[in-house]
């Protein structure tokens, strides 16, 4: 096996984009970052008790320990940071998995990764008596890792066609779903905990969870962003990519590792959240075109915008109660997904 | 193995019965397989009736069914266990037919009611009744029926774009299914723990405690719709060749598809109303039937008998396998269905078909 760095193994797009287009993309990325900051501020300010923005600023940078400051530091801030991290994780995971499988409808959920995490967590709750959210993290992570390896092995590590991968994911998801059901039915205590975890929520965020998932998400994000060139080559088809000198097996393995890290940590932290990884890369592709080196950073910025926006929306619509973020993203993502299916030619899945 | 597959692609041996104006082609293998599956389903039913806290030998079961049992046996067989078994047979058959129709129409083995969200839709209807209205079992069944029909209508309408096409139907269904799953998840978080437990049992799909109230409506649905479906079987077969070919052969494509989809949705919703969304029977039964008959058509009747046999066998296994904890049958079919899909994947891959 020759060791070629991803940079060398990758390929330039057929014609280098004009400088103006690059400038426009960069400007767009900066603008997106601005939107993200605004949404993050809104996420801290809006809630059961609205906090004016100057108070938010005060709480973040001139902490004096007032009640509002405590709410900001201990409740709203961890929640916002977690939303940010999870959003980055899901968006990047979705972008990588869509590129890798050449399947525009691929999603960590479709490939059964969420189900793997859920199965591991429900086992931990029921058989090992794990009760804390910080305890779930490791099991969810393990479950995601096992399933991604399994799906990949079943899907055919040497020549993973999109259909085969999707089928492998569906099959694994189905088998695990049956298992999760069985455990929940035999153990109503597990059910009581699981039913809140499985809808996907940021409500129980705290700094411990944030600290635990951050390293995984960081490594995964760096890995994903570094894979841009190789994934561009993968998009050209196996033969072309190979002819261009891309080490396909290594690209696939690294991509799966990145997806596992990103999706596993995200799911562990707040339950399975669907559609972020599916929808954002789609929207991004409409802005940037097919170049993965732009899609990935855009997805990393815009996915948390969607996630935090959904979380804020969920807090607004049923105030003073709240709608879990996973439900909101599904209700935003579902119609978009159906719209995409109706609009596009989906001759080959 | 390869040779027989090649022959089966060209067509199976058949007998053609002709009278003055009518001709009927019977495929020998298909007919024999169908008959055998029916026998298996009925035999398993007898075994299932004999299973429980008060075991009965098959001979006793048959004698009691014929009306010659003791009073105790009569009560246990005819009042307690027969409705459950009949419900199982009918649910299995209905799901099998519905799955065969959907898979034929979408020309995709994944285009089953499970995948396109009908089960989730029925579950959403039932959960709404359980969680928000605290309804009794009959109201839950009505909720399930309504949810299933509404979902079927929504999926069909959303997938419609100058006709309903296979992959679009499956994909729209997957999207709808995901949204309904979120609704169900939300309803579960809204529920008190007892309601949530009840709801989860219902969602898993269970035959526990079925009585005649569940059997009769389903039996009526089957009696009315099965002839309709069989009358359309020939058109369905032509649809499998593609819309253009079917149209050229004189099939009114959209009308046929609409009628068949409607019946399949009603089959699924009625089965779900009776037993909850039992996973994978609709996906697996037509595929297994197709493999056994080695026939390319929709295999409607073999799929129905296969569904019935599968569900009754699964219910028997679910009662026996976990000791004191009786699991709902849907949990077992879910796990087995997943395993089946994995197996399918491995063999298809080895054969180089995907």
Image (spheres, coloured by chain):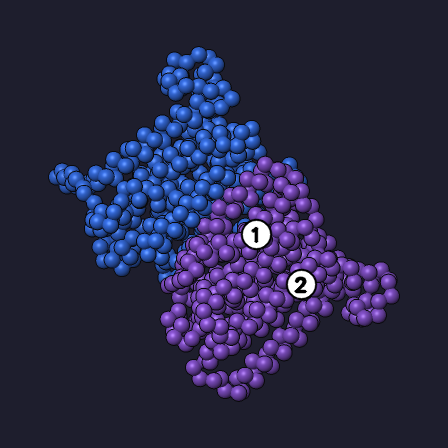
Chain colours: A purple, B blue
Count the marks. Answer: 2
Q: Say few, some or many: other residues with alpha carbon within 10 Å of mark 2 (under 14 / 14 to 19 / 20 or more).
A: some
Q: Position of residue B167 (x, y in %)?
A: 39, 58
Residue for point 45% across, 27% down: B83
Task: Tell me which corner region of the image, top left, top right, bottom left or bottom right, holds residue A200.
Answer: bottom right
**Toward the viewer: B42 or A341?**
B42
User: Who's the residue at 62% across and 59% down the image?
Assistant: A266
Q: Is residue A288 above or below residue A71?
A: below
Mark 1 lies on a secondary structure that is helix
Chain under numbered label 1:
A
**Residue B332 locus on image (x, y percent):** 48, 38
The residue indicated by pointer 1 is A143
For numbered disc 2, what is the local secondary structure? helix
Q: Is residue A320 left or right of residue A67?
A: left
Residue hosting label 2: A214
Which quarter of the figure has residue A87? bottom right
Query: Disc 2 is attached to a residue of which chain?
Result: A
Whether residue A136 is visible, yes or no, is yes
- Relative to A37, is B354 on the left or the right? left
Looking at the image, is B339 positioned above or below residue A114? Answer: above
Mark with earlier residue (2, 1): 1
Relative to B107, A49 lies left or right: right
Name the residue at 46% across, 72% down: A2
Residue B137 in the image: x percent, y percent?
Answer: 55, 34
Q: Are marks 2 and 1 on the same chain?
A: yes
- Residue in view at x 25 percent, y 35 percent: B32
């Amino acid at each position: 096996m020759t060791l070629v760095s991803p940079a060398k193994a990758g390929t330039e797009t057929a014609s280098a984009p004009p400088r103006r287009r690059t400038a426009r993309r960069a400007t767009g990325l900066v603008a997106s970052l601005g939107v993200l900051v605004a949404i993050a501020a809104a996420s801290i300010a809006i809630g059961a008790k609205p906090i004016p923005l100057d108070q938010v600023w005060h709480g973040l940078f001139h902490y004096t320990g007032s009640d509002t400051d405590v709410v900001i530091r201990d409740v709203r801030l961890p929640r916002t940071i977690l939303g940010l991290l999870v959003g980055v994780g899901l968006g990047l995971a979705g972008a990588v998995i869509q590129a890798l499988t050449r399947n525009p409808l691929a999603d960590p959920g479709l490939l059964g990764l969420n189900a793997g995490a859920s199965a591991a967590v429900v086992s931990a709750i029921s058989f090992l008596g794990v009760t804390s959210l910080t305890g779930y993290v490791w099991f969810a992570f393990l479950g995601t890792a096992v399933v991604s390896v399994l799906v990949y092995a079943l899907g055919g590590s040497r020549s993973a066609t999109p259909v085969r991968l999707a089928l492998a994911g569906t099959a694994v998801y189905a088998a695990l779903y049956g298992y999760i059901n069985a455990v929940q039915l035999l153990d109503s205590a597990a059910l009581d905990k699981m039913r809140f975890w499985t809808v996907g929520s940021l409500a129980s965020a705290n700094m411990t969870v944030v600290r635990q998932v951050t390293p995984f998400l960081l490594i995964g994000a760096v890995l994903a962003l570094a894979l841009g060139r190789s994934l561009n080559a993968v998009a050209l088809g196996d033969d072309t990519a190979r002819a261009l000198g891309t080490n396909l097996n290594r690209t696939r393995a690294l991509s799966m590792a990145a997806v596992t890290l990103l999706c596993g940590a995200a799911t562990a932290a707040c339950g399975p959240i669907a559609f972020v990884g599916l929808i954002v890369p789609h929207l991004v592709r409409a802005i940037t075109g097919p170049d993965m080196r732009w899609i990935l950073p855009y997805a990393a910025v815009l996915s948390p915008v969607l996630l935090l926006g959904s979380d804020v929306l969920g807090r607004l619509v049923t105030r003073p109660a709240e709608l879990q973020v996973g439900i909101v993203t599904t209700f935003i993502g579902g119609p978009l997904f159906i719209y995409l299916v109706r609009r596009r030619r989906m001759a080959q899945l | 193995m390869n040779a027989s597959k090649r022959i089966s692609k060209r067509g199976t041996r058949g007998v053609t019965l002709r009278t003055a104006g009518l001709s009927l082609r019977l495929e020998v293998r298909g007919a024999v397989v169908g008959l055998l599956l029916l026998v298996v389903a009925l035999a398993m039913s007898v075994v299932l009736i004999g299973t429980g806290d008060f075991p009965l030998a098959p001979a006793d079961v048959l004698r009691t069914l014929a009306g010659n049992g003791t009073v105790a046996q009569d009560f246990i067989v005819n009042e307690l266990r027969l409705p459950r078994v009949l419900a199982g047979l009918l649910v299995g058959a209905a799901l099998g037919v519905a799955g065969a129709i959907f898979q034929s129409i979408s020309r995709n083995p994944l285009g089953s009611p499970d995948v396109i969200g009908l089960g989730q839709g029925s579950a959403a209807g039932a959960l709404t009744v359980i969680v928000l209205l605290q309804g009794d079992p009959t109201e839950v069944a009505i909720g399930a029926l309504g949810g299933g029909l509404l979902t079927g209508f929504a999926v069909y309408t959303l997938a419609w774009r100058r006709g309903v096409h296979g992959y679009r139907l499956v994909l729209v269904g997957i999207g709808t299914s995901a949204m309904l799953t979120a609704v169900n998840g939300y309803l579960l978080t809204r529920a008190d723990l007892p309601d949530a437990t009840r709801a989860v049992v219902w969602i898993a799909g269970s035959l526990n405690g079925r009585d005649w109230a569940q059997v009769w409506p389903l039996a009526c649905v089957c009696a009315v719709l099965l002839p309709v479906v069989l009358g359309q079987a020939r058109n369905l077969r032509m649809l499998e060749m593609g819309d253009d070919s079917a149209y050229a052969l004189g099939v009114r494509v959209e009308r046929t598809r609409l009628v068949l989809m409607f019946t399949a949705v009603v089959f699924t919703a009625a089965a779900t109303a009776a037993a909850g969304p039992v996973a994978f029977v609709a996906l697996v039964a037509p595929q297994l039937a197709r493999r056994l008959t080695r026939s390319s058509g929709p295999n409607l009747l073999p799929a129905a008998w296969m569904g019935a046999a599968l569900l009754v066998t699964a219910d028997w296994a679910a009662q026996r396998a976990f000791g004191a904890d009786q699991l709902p049958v849907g949990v077992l079919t879910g796990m087995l269905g997943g395993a089946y899909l994995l197996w399918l994947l491995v063999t298809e891959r080895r054969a180089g078909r995907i």
